[in-house]
Image: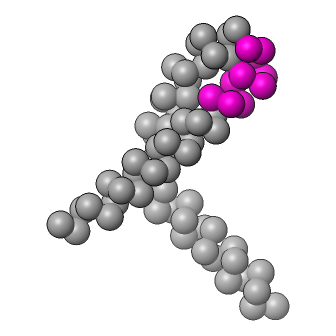
Amino acid sequence: MMDDGYWLGYKISWVLIFIGSWIYCIASYGFLLGVGLGWLPSLIVASIGAFLWQIALGILFLGIVLLFSQ
């Protein structure tokens, strides 16, 4: 039951990272290579990066706190 929140965050961040990196591949390597082959590195990056979503969320929260505490 307690792990449900982690896996929900994992799935949401996986989708966001995958779409973002696929768009980056399309912009960097052109339409044919980006769409045709860009899904593979996007899949790898999203799978690795989604495990770190709690760290990224903590850094974002810390940055917001430091920004508004001045």
Q: Image height check: is 47 above or below 31?
A: below
Is 8 in front, or is 47?
8
Q: Which residue is painted at 60% across and 11% down in the image?
A: 36
User: Which percent across, then down, holds residue 56?
Assistant: 56, 60
Q: Quarter-wise, where is residue 29 in the image?
A: top right
Residue sitting at 70 percent across and 8 percent down? 32
Give the position of the C terminus as an image quadrant.
bottom right
Q: Is residue 27 left or right of 33 when viewed as pictured?
A: right
Whole-percent x and y of residue 41? 55, 23
Direction from residue 7 to residue 60 in the image, left or right: right
Which residue occupies 78% across, 25% down? 27
The span shown in magenta is 22-31
Query: Which quadrant, please, contains the N terminus?
Result: bottom left
Q: Main secondary structure of the magenta part?
A: helix
Q: Is residue 26 magenta?
A: yes
Residue 19 lies in the magenta-colored region: no
- From the viewer's perspective, is residue 38 above or below residue 59? above
Position of 60 with respect to 5 (left or right) is right
- Residue nearest the viewer, comparing 23 with 60: 23
User: Is residue 19 at all visible to an observer of this figure?
Assistant: yes
Residue 68, given in percent of the width and then of the height, sits at 76, 86
Q: Position of residue 44 (x, y in %)?
A: 48, 29
Q: Is residue 52 visible?
A: no
Give residue 21's quadrant in the image: top right
Q: Indicate the quadrant where residue 60 lies.
A: bottom right
Of residues 32 and 46, the one nearer the viewer is 32
